[in-house]
Image (cartoon, grey):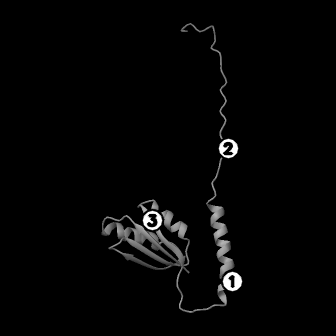
C-alpha cells in the first residue's frame, strides 16, 4: 500500500472532477480524496506513483508533496524486515528507470553532385 499526496494547480470544479476521473482510471487505486482548499489530491492503494504523476502532469502543474507507504493499524513488526528488502529493490528499479539516456549523435553525410555542363539554362 502506498500513499501519494500531490498539489495540483486547479482553477475550478471542472478541473477537480477531471483530475479525480483521470486518477481513478488507474488499477490498484484504493481511495481518493481531494482537499479543495489547498488543491491537494491524496491517493492511496497499490499503484505506481510515477505513472499517476506523469498522467497528471500532462494536464496540470503538479507538485509532489509526499510519497510513501500508507499507515497500517496492524502494527506487525515481523513483516517489516522482509518489506525493507523489497523497498531497496523498488528504489533500485526506480533509479534504473530514471537514469539519463544518452543517444549516439546522428552523422549526416553530404555528397556533392556536379551539375551537367550540357544544361542550357545554367
Residue 56 at what x, y percent from top left?
A: 45, 64
- In the displayed structure image, the side of residue 78 where residue 28 appears, left or right: left
Is 45 located above or below residue 61 in the figure? below
Residue at horizontal 67 percent and vertical 24 percent from the top: 111
Coordinates of residue 29 in the picture (x, y in percent): 50, 77
Which of the pair 30/25 is nearer the observer? Answer: 30
Lower sequence index among marks 1 and 2: 1
From the viewer's perspective, is residue 31 above or below residue 122? below
The x and y percentages for residue 31 are 46, 80
Mark 2: which secondary structure?
Answer: loop
Q: Callout 1: few (<14), some (14-19), or many (20+) C-alpha neighbours within 10 Å?
A: few
Instruction: Count residues near mark 2 (Cα–Cα under 10 Å), then give few for <14, some for 14-19, many for 20+.
Output: few
In the picture, measured across the screen, residue 29 lies left or right of residue 19, that is: right
Image point 56% across, 78% down: which residue?
46
Question: Pointer 3: what residue?
Answer: 63
**Quadrant housing the N terminus:** bottom right
16 or 5: nearer the viewer: 5
Q: Residue furthest left?
A: 12
Where the C terminus falls, by quadrant? top right
Q: Secondary structure at mark 1?
A: helix
Residue 85 vs residue 16, the one in the foreground: 85
- Is disc 1 in contact with disc 3, using a CB cutoff of under 8 Å? no
Residue 114: x percent and y percent?
A: 65, 15
> Which residue does the numbered mark 2 point to in the structure image?
104
The residue identified by callout 1 is: 82
Hey, which quadrant is residue 48 in on the image? Answer: bottom right
Residue at point 50% right, 68% down?
52
Residues at marks 3 and 2, CA–CA distance in whole angstroms = 33 Å
Residue 121 relative to residue 84: left or right: left
Does residue 67 lie above or below 120 as drawn? Answer: below
Please tell me which of labels 1 and 3 falls first in the chain: 3
Amino acid at each position: 500500500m502506498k500513499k501519494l499526496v500531490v498539489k495540483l494547480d486547479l482553477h475550478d470544479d471542472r478541473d477537480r472532477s477531471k483530475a479525480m476521473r483521470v486518477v481513478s482510471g488507474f488499477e490498484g487505486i484504493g481511495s481518493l480524496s481531494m482537499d479543495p482548499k489547498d488543491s491537494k489530491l491524496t491517493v492511496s492503494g497499490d499503484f505506481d506513483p510515477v505513472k499517476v504523476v506523469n498522467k497528471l502532469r500532462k494536464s496540470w502543474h503538479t507538485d509532489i508533496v509526499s510519497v510513501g507507504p500508507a499507515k497500517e493499524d496492524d502494527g506487525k513488526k515481523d513483516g517489516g524486515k522482509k518489506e525493507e528488502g523489497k523497498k531497496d529493490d523498488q528504489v533500485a528499479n526506480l533509479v534504473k528507470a530514471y537514469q539519463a539516456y544518452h543517444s549516439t549523435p546522428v552523422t549526416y553525410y553530404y555528397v556533392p553532385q556536379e551539375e551537367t555542363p550540357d544544361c542550357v539554362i545554367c
